[in-house]
Image (tube, grey):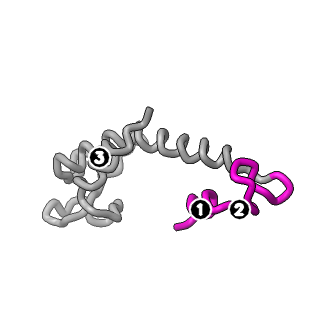
Amino acid sequence: MMDVEHIKALEQAATPGPWYWDEDNWLDVAAAHYVIEPDDDGFEDTTQLKVRPEDKAFIADARSAVPALVAAVERVQALHTPMNDVCISCDLVYPCPTIETLEAS
């Protein structure tokens, strides 16, 4: 089961985003960029990646948290599917408020 409160705490402790890869300035160790050095073997060498400990925890946990969050959203979407323009879960016109909320940006 996904621990939403744990994920929220990690996200709130991490440096605010958006984070980006500044490929042109990866040697600038004084810059406040989250950057990764390209490597010849197709991998990314993270020796130049500058992060706070809180950011490391967020990045590491994201590998399992993101798939869990996606799966949770997919389960909710599966419950709220249309049949003859009506949501089969809540018997409202499709898209129902649940789907509208999930799709809001």
| Residue at (27% x, 49% y) in the render | 9
Q: Amino acid at mark 2?
A: Pro
Does 96 appear above or below 43? Answer: below
Residue 103: image tag? 1
Quadrant of the rendered image containing residue 47: top left
How many residues crowd mark 2 within 10 Å: few (<14), some (14–19), many (20+)? some
- The part of the chain drawn in magenta is 83-105
| Residue at (30% x, 52% y) in the render | 11
Q: Amino acid at mark 3?
A: Phe
| Residue at (28% x, 57% y) in the render | 35
| Residue at (47% x, 39% y) in the render | 68
Say which of marks 3 and 2 sits in front: 2
Mark 2 or mark 1: which comes first in sequence?
2
Q: Position of residue 76 (x, y in %)?
A: 60, 46
Q: Which residue is mark 3?
A: 58
Q: CA distance from mark 3 to mark 2?
A: 33 Å
Q: Amino acid at mark 1?
A: Glu
Say which of marks 1 and 3 sits in front: 1
Mark 2 vs 1: CB contact within 8 A: yes
